[in-house]
Amino acid sequence: MKAGLFASACVAAVVVSSPVLAQSGSAAGQEDARRDAASVGEVVVTATRRPERLQDVPLSITAFSQEDLTAKGIVGYEGLARETPGVVLNKPTANFNNFTARGVATNGYGANLQSTVAIYIDELPISTIGNTTVIDPNLFDVERVEFLRGPQGTLFGSGSLSGALRILTKSPDLSKYDASALVDLGLTGSDSVRQRYNGMINLPLVDDKLALRVVGFYRHEEGYVDNLGTGVHNANTLVDWGGRAILLWEPNDRLSVKLLASYEDSNPKDSSLIDPRLGRERRRSDRPDLFVGKLETYNATIEHQFDGARLTSSTTYSRFDQKFFVDLAGTFGGAIAFGLDAWAYQNTFVEEARLASDPGGRFDWVVGGFYLDRRLDVDYFYRSSPAFLAARRITGLPDEYYQRQFNYTDSHELAGFGEVTWRLDERFWLTGGMRYGRVDAQGFVQGGYNSNYLTAALTPGFSGPLTITQLSPVAGLKAQGSKPSFKISASFRPRPSVTTYATVSTGFRTPIINAFGGRPSLVNPNDLVIPAGADSDDLTNYEIGLKGRWFDGRLAANLAAYWIDWSNIQVQANRVSDSVQFATNIGAARSRGLEFEILAFPRSGLTVGFNGSFNNAKVTELSPAEAAISGAVPGARLAAPRFQGSAYVDYGFDLSPRARANLSLVLQHVGSYPGMFPRVPGQPNVVAPTYGFTDAYENVNATFAVNFDKFTVGAYVENLFDDHSLTYVHPEAFLANRFGTMRPRTAGVRVGYEF
């Protein structure tokens, strides 16, 4: 099979000389409609919690339909980030995702900090803190993906400090039977096979009243990184499977009830992080590093149409089980065996109820309430290894784990929100919104034990029994915060096809509790004691934008310029002696930038697109004490490229009356940026040995696809020029393998069919 796939890849490489597209069964007709000049700018989004034309929303938004995703081969977060201006994805390995928007990030890891971009699947927020596993959701058969840039605290709460990513699943069709399948077979390098299988079936059970939609998927993607420590070739293989079922009941034209159940099991067999000193795509760890996630979700959404307004109630319960196994031997240069095996169990309940006016009136409004109850249990098991313990004759442990600690955190968020748009006339309207929320979180230690292993292992000649200390249950401090977020904007339409706007909006993150608050260092008792936690930070975004169409719809553009003031910044710090992570606050930063999206239709069948962003983000205020604890310096760059962008060309033409072909090319560029602050926390005059920049890199994708009514076949090449640039730099020394890289050249075929 590998030989056959390789042959297909060679054919694809000859047929096309670059980037990304394979279409679904009815894609040709939908592409024609999408490219029709009259339809440009008529995309409908629900970013304001009510359906509105994208052109009328005073926000910078990039929207992807299912056809867009399929056409561009986007199956996960990487594709979304590369196609969204001002956004980068910090992805050291599968299931470890942390977005940065508009330069609002101090590093790409965000240990112990709430993410600055909120990720939602329907109404469920799945992003938590930066160093928590965040699953790669399957994007087959979704209604739409929306990436909102700028703070979204008014409608989406804490965690949407610099943006929000919304993945909206597709509802059942009550009137017709439908089914589709998409198969993707590819080859990475010379011997790494990619297999992706997706299927959907839509079943009307009672005509125009009741329908069921079921989606299933399976991915088996062999890795491309060799682990020299475990001896496994292509160690970072990913196996991901799951599905969802949605039942929709509409007994009349005013009431609808939608029930959803979904499950995804994402199981990477090892990390993708590498050590370039070992050679290309190589790493070394004593055993596989694991970042495994299983997400189970249940949702009930009830909607009722009143005269003039629509009531929506969405109730969600989810369970997210995680494994976080990592070799930490890099902390001490590999001198001793040192690792962490952590199991996490997160249960989340979310309720949101909102009442939105029917669009089109003089006043459009939405009011609602939000409640979140989340419990996160984390079992920290710090380990040595049987071989190291035996070689050093260290005894006294029940097994290889020298420390066990059982923790859990209870957190809650309660908020009320509202937004109103006042249309003074057809050309001018004002929008104002506010959210007032209260958040709290409290950590608990349920028990466990500790030992003097680290001190003993680092002492030459030590042998014999260790001292075991039992940990008593402890209730941590309760972090609480309450504050408003607001948004004010004015929109003006100088002509029917052009909209301009000016917006001021705010955002914040919840207070953070340090799990090890109050703990001294066992390696150096004179080192700092971990503080209790970090307060909320504050962010204000000033933005102007333009959205429009010209030349009878042959040219469309979205432009946005912003100035962001960010103060009392939550940052990650690391204690020098043992690399224990904790959260704290430091001074202020500023981010300024320009985002653009341009789409042109110079002739029938030809589409040319450009998108990109310029950004300048740096620290502007910092006290000496803040510099010492964080490693920051005045003027330090934040973790974002100064320029990134992509160019897209797609040409569609008829091969025959029944066959339409598409040839597409995408070139993406991401500039270099730092992975952390430049100094060692606690040693402000010492440049951190882990300080480094990602590479500036280009990614080129190509696709040639042919649509035969219900059947589509396409050949593609990703990373055409086999760029091996470093796209991620881990900020902490405890990892010996600290660098993420692009997936090597991958070529394959996609086959889609609609029944």
Image: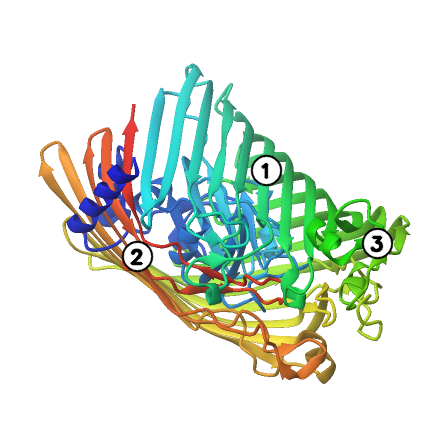
Vertical placement of 306 versus 145: above or below? above
What residue is shown at x 72% (from left), y 60% (from top)?
Answer: 483
| Mark 2 and mark 1 residues within 8 Å of each other at the beta carbon | no
Instruction: Find numbered disc 3 in the image and state the secondary structure of the residue it sits on.
Output: strand
Which quadrant is home to the C terminus? top left
Assign a secondary structure to mark 2. Answer: loop
Nearer-N-terminus badge (1/3): 1
Looking at the rendered structure, the kind of residue marked 2 is: Ser
Disc 1 residue type (three-letter): Lys
Distance Cα–Cα, label 2 vs label 1: 45 Å
User: Badge 3: how crowded within 10 Å, few (<14), some, or many (20+)?
Assistant: some
Q: Secondary structure at mark 1?
A: strand
Mark 1 or 3: the one toward you = 3
The residue singled out by tag 2 in the image is: 497
The amino acid at mark 3 is Asn
Would you call the spot at circle 1 few (<14 residues within 10 Å), some (14-19), or many (20 or more)?
Answer: many
- Residue 198 on image: x %, y %: 39, 32
Left or right placement of residue 743 versus residue 621 in this view: left
Task: Give the labeled residue for mark 1.
Answer: 294
- The answer to whether residue 744 shows anywhere in this view is yes
Task: Tell me the residue at 89%/53% (across/down).
Answer: 469
Say the numbered circle drawn on residue 450: 3
The image position of residue 139, as x and y in percent, is 43, 40
Q: Quadrant of residue 526?
A: bottom right
Above or below, 238 relative to 130: above
